[in-house]
C-alpha cells in the first residue's frame, strides 16, 4: 500500500465521483437523445405533449439514478480510503468530505451532459412559448439535500471499512 496524504485521498475519491458523473451523464444523454430522435424526429419543440412528457420522464429518471448512486459511490470510495487510512478518524473524515463534495461534482457533471441532449433536441430553445425548457431552480434544493446523506454514508462507510480491515 502506498502512503498517500489525506488531501490526495480526498482528491482521488472526488475524481472517482467525477468519472462516474461523466458515465452517468453520457448514459442519460444517449437515452434522452435516442427518445428525442425516435419519437420526435429530433425536434422536441414540435413534438406533441405525450412525447415531450415521455422525454422529460427519461431525463428525470436519469437524474434520479445519479442522485441514488451517490451513496453507492461513497461506499466504494470508503472501502479504498479505509485501506489507506492510518486511523479510524482519518478514514471517516477523508471519505465523508470526499463523498460530500464528490456528490456535487458527480451530479453537476452528469446534469450538464444530460441537459445538452435536451438542448440539442430543441427542447430548451428560445421562442417564448413557455413550458419548453426545464427550470433548474426546482432541482437545487433536492440536490443540496441529497448531498448530506451521501456525505454521511461516506463518513460511515469509511469508518466501517477501516474497522473491517
Image: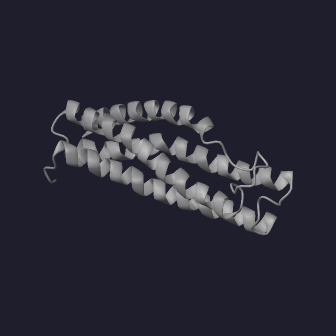
Rendered location of residue 63, percent (x, y): 59, 47
Taking depth in this image into account, of 111 and 73 the one nearest to the observer is 111
Task: Give x and y (percent) for residue 97.
Answer: 31, 36
Horizontal arrangement in the rendering, residue 28 relative to residue 157 (left or right): right
Q: Quadrant of residue 140?
A: top right
Query: In the picture, residue 121 is in which quadrant?
Result: bottom right
Q: Taking 58 as reference, is 149 left or right? A: left
Residue displayed at 65% across by 47% down: 61
Does 128 sit left or right of 65 as displayed? right
Q: Which residue shows up at 34% across the image and 53% down it?
A: 15
User: How many numbered discs?
Assistant: 0
Q: Which residue extends farthest front? A: 128
Q: Which of 88 and 118 is in front in this view?
A: 118
Q: In this view, does 147 lie above or below 4?
A: above
Q: Position of residue 31 (x, y in %)?
A: 65, 61
Say which of 132 and 85 sits in front.
132
Q: In which quarter of the image is the C terminus?
A: top left
Residue 41, relative to residue 159: is it above or below?
Answer: below
Residue sitting at x 70%, y 49%: 133
Q: What colour-coding does the image apply?
A: one colour
Specify the farthest residue to the left: 3
Measured as percent of width and height from the top left, residue 47 is found at: 83, 59
Kindly indicate the quadrant of the structure image that contains residue 122: bottom right
Above or below residue 34? Residue 138 is above
Amino acid at each position: 500500500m502506498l502512503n498517500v496524504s489525506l488531501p490526495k485521498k480526498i482528491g482521488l475519491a472526488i475524481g472517482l465521483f467525477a468519472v462516474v458523473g461523466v458515465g452517468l451523464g453520457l448514459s442519460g444523454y444517449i437515452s434522452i437523445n435516442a427518445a428525442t430522435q425516435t419519437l420526435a424526429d429530433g425536434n422536441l419543440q414540435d413534438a406533441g405533449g405525450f412525447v415531450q412528457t415521455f422525454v422529460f420522464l427519461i431525463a428525470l429518471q436519469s437524474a434520479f439514478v445519479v442522485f441514488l448512486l451517490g451513496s453507492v459511490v461513497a461506499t466504494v470510495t470508503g472501502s479504498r480510503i479505509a485501506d489507506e487510512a492510518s486511523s479510524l478518524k482519518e478514514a471517516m473524515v477523508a471519505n465523508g468530505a470526499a463523498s460530500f463534495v464528490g456528490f456535487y461534482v458527480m451530479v453537476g457533471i452528469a446534469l450538464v451532459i444530460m441537459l445538452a441532449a435536451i438542448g440539442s433536441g430543441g427542447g430548451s430553445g428560445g421562442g417564448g412559448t413557455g413550458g419548453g425548457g426545464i427550470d433548474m431552480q426546482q432541482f437545487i434544493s433536492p440536490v443540496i439535500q441529497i448531498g448530506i446523506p451521501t456525505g454521511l454514508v461516506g463518513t460511515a462507510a469509511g469508518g466501517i471499512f477501516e474497522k473491517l480491515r
